[in-house]
């Protein structure tokens, strides 16, 4: 495993869905790129919010949307549905924490364009504690010699890694 591993928003996202996916993604074992869910997510990212600045890279994080709100900097995370809302909230909280470490204060906004819904996310002490615990556990998972065994969860049915885990 690479000693210069950086925790990313994607690893945070997957951590709250499936620990096996964390291990696979950390090793650049990418999901089935032809999976319709992967394609749909890419399409939504590219086609929604055309007037916003998108895909801003800051070091090892990639922000979907960045804009100036009435109270300052706002970063947005765009998801195809709220089905993974808890995971998306933690991913966005991670980005807020990384910006805070760099000396930038921002608010977050989860966006679900198909549902025409937005949710504001602010970095709280509770979210910071949950993130710290997740980062420690992600590092533990990533440095395992082999992937954690597959565990069937409700997300497996549409997962782009399904063939890898269940064939």
Image (spheres, rainbow, N blue to C red):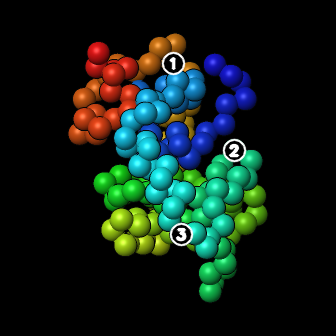
Pointers 2 and 1 in contact (CB under 8 A)?
no
Left or right, residue 108 beside residue 37:
right
Circle 1 packing at 10 Å, graded few (<14), some (14-19), many (20+), is few
Q: In which quarter of the image is residue 160?
A: top left
Q: In this rendering, which labeled residue sits more in front, label 3 or label 1?
A: 3
Q: Mark 3: which secondary structure?
A: loop
Q: In which quarter of the image is residue 14?
A: top left
Left or right, residue 19 beside residue 70:
left
Whichever of labels 2 and 3 marks the residue nearer the N terminus, that label is 3
Pointers 3 and 1 in contact (CB under 8 A)?
no
Left or right, residue 149 beside residue 53:
left
Residue hosting label 2: 60
Q: Which of 153 and 140 is in front in this view?
A: 153
Whichever of labels 2 and 1 marks the residue nearer the N terminus, that label is 2
Give percent across and percent down for residue 105. 68, 69
* Residue name at image x 44 percent, y 50 percent: 41
Residue hosting label 1: 144
């Amino acid at each position: 495993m690479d000693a210069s591993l950086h925790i990313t928003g994607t690893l945070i996202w997957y951590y709250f869905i499936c620990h096996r996916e964390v291990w696979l993604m950390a090793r650049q074992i990418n999901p089935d790129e032809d999976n319709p869910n992967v394609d749909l997510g890419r399409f939504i990212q590219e086609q929604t919010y055309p007037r916003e600045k998108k895909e801003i890279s800051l070091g090892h994080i990639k922000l979907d949307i960045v804009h100036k709100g009435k109270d300052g900097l706002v970063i947005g995370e765009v998801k195809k549905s709220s089905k993974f809302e808890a995971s998306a909230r933690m991913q966005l909280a991670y980005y807020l924490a990384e910006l805070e470490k760099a000396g930038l204060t921002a608010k977050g906004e989860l966006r679900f364009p198909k549902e025409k819904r937005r949710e504001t996310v602010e970095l709280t002490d509770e979210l910071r504690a949950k993130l710290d615990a997740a980062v420690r556990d992600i590092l533990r998972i990533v440095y395992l010699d082999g992937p954690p065994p597959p565990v069937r969860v409700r997300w497996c049915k549409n997962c782009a890694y399904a063939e890898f885990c269940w064939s």
